[in-house]
Image (tube, helix red, strand yellow):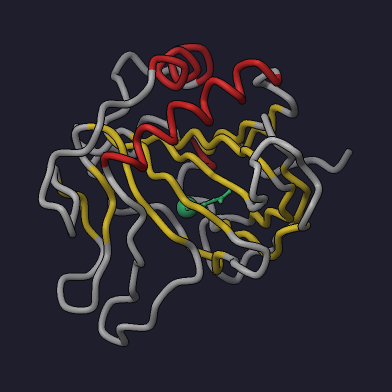
Amino acid sequence: MQVLPKGIRHLPGFLDREKQEALVENIRAIVADAPFFVPVMPRTGKPMSVRMTNCGSLGWVTDRDRGYRYQPQHPVTGRSWPVIPEILLDLWRTVSGSAKLPEACLVNFYTDDARMGLHQDRDEKDLEAPVVSVSLGDTCLFRVGGRERTDRTLSFKLSSGDVVVLGGEGRLAFHGVDKIYPNTSMLLKNGGRINLTLRRVTV
Ligand code: SIN
Ligand code: FE2
């Protein structure tokens, strides 16, 4: 096993199959209420390859004119986001080391050819609480580095049920998803990968 950068924790198989299935059911209900939308890059308006939705009191959204931000309503339906499932709040209490609860849970859906470029999660006012992320479905190749874009990076696979915590010195680590390995999990009937990212937004 390679040594991960300080503040980055990889917890392989943290959620057992039963919890993963329960979570998929929760996500189906979330998506029925808050459908996936197509996130587009600020300024250029270029669509990202993932599809997104959220649960929690705040959701992360992006569009050409207003850029990256958190807001209490779905950008298309105008409705409040559904609540964060209890399984995820439990997970947060177990691994975050934060007394505050997460306000946002971003749901990213990756088809076989989707990816996520190297970026920092820095739209939150609170940078004390960690970012906690859960992988479901197909395996991906995850890349993580340091606080500068030019810092050396390393990559490792994330499988269904794995949890990653970016906390402390790792809170602002650059990270991204280089590729999805199709047909590596039977969890999602139609394949693909779901990533759930829990964050505290306000201080
Ligand atoms: C993200 O950084 O928004 C997603 C990370 C992942 O899909 O594992
Ligand atoms: Fe991220």
Q: Residue at x 60, y 24 (%)?
A: 21
Residue 181 is left or right of residue 104, and the answer is right
Q: Give the vertical position of 91 relative to 124 (above or below).
A: above
Q: Position of residue 120 (x, y in %)?
A: 45, 57
Task: Classify residue 174 by image quadrant.
Answer: bottom right
The number of callouts visible is: 0
Residue that appears at 50% across and 70% down: 49
Looking at the picture, how far across and down is residue 6, in whole percent?
A: 63, 39
Q: Is residue 43 above or below residue 202?
A: below
Q: Between residues 48 and 77, which one lies in front from this camera angle?
A: 77
Horizontal and vertical percent for residue 54?
Answer: 32, 43
Q: Is residue 20 left or right of residue 183?
A: left
Q: Quadrant of the C terminus?
A: top left
Q: Is residue 82 above or below residue 75?
A: above
Q: Name the quadrant of the N terminus.
A: top right
Residue with the most extreme right position: 1
Q: Which residue is located at x 52 percent, y 40 percent?
A: 169
Of the pair 138 and 154, the residue shown nearer to us: 138
Q: Nearer the viewer, residue 146 or 96?
A: 96
Spot occupied by residue 171 in the image (x, y as percentages of width and height): 47, 42
Instruction: Work out which residue is located at the far left of the displayed protein and give it.
Output: 78
In the picture as drawn, the residue positioned furthest to the bottom comes out as 44
**70 to the left or right of 153:** left
Q: Residue at x 45, y 40 (%)?
A: 197
- Which of the 4 image quarters holds residue 145? bottom right
